[in-house]
Image (cartoon, rainbow, N blue to C red):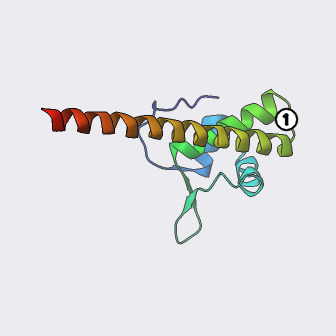
Amino acid sequence: MLFKPGENERLYYTVTEVAELLDVNASLLRFWEKEFDIIKPKRNKKGTRFYTAADIEKIRMIYKLVKDQGFTLQGAREKMKAKQNHQVDNNAEVLSKLRYVREVLVKIGESI
């Protein structure tokens, strides 16, 4: 796979461009879009798909799970969902710590 996050500066990519970047068929991308609800490319009035770097990263992860690691589509969906849930838990923990730091800083500011 040729795409590396942060390497290209464009905001949107067509399905053909993404297929070339990831060395897959455009039809596979369209199929995975139906199978994985986390892939939601933007569309223009004509229905042309436009993928963001975040979409491409999700597709790359799906590719890795299905093609490289041999997961079934259902198994890949479950793994992606578990990863999302874990990330949400981590985000909640970080948010909690930031709120605590903010409280401490406010108290320090009040004492000055």
The residue furthest front is 111
Q: Which amino acid does label 1 sit on?
A: Phe
In the image, residue 111 sits, relative to residue 31, either above or below, namely: above
Please name the residue shown 26% across and 34% down the image: 105
* Quarter-of-image position of residue 58: top right
Please name the residue shown 77% across and 33% down the image: 65
Question: From this viewpoint, is residue 76 visible?
Answer: yes
Residue located beneath label 1 in the image: 71
In the image, residue 5 sits, relative to residue 74, either above or below, namely: above
The count of marks equals 1
The residue furthest left is 112
Q: Where is residue 55 in the image (x, y as percent from the top left)?
A: 58, 46
In this view, the residue in front, 45 or 76, is: 76
* Quarter-of-image position of residue 57: top right
Q: Looking at the figure, which quarter contains the C terminus?
A: top left
Please name the residue shown 45% across and 32% down the image: 6
Question: From this viewpoint, is residue 24 visible?
Answer: no
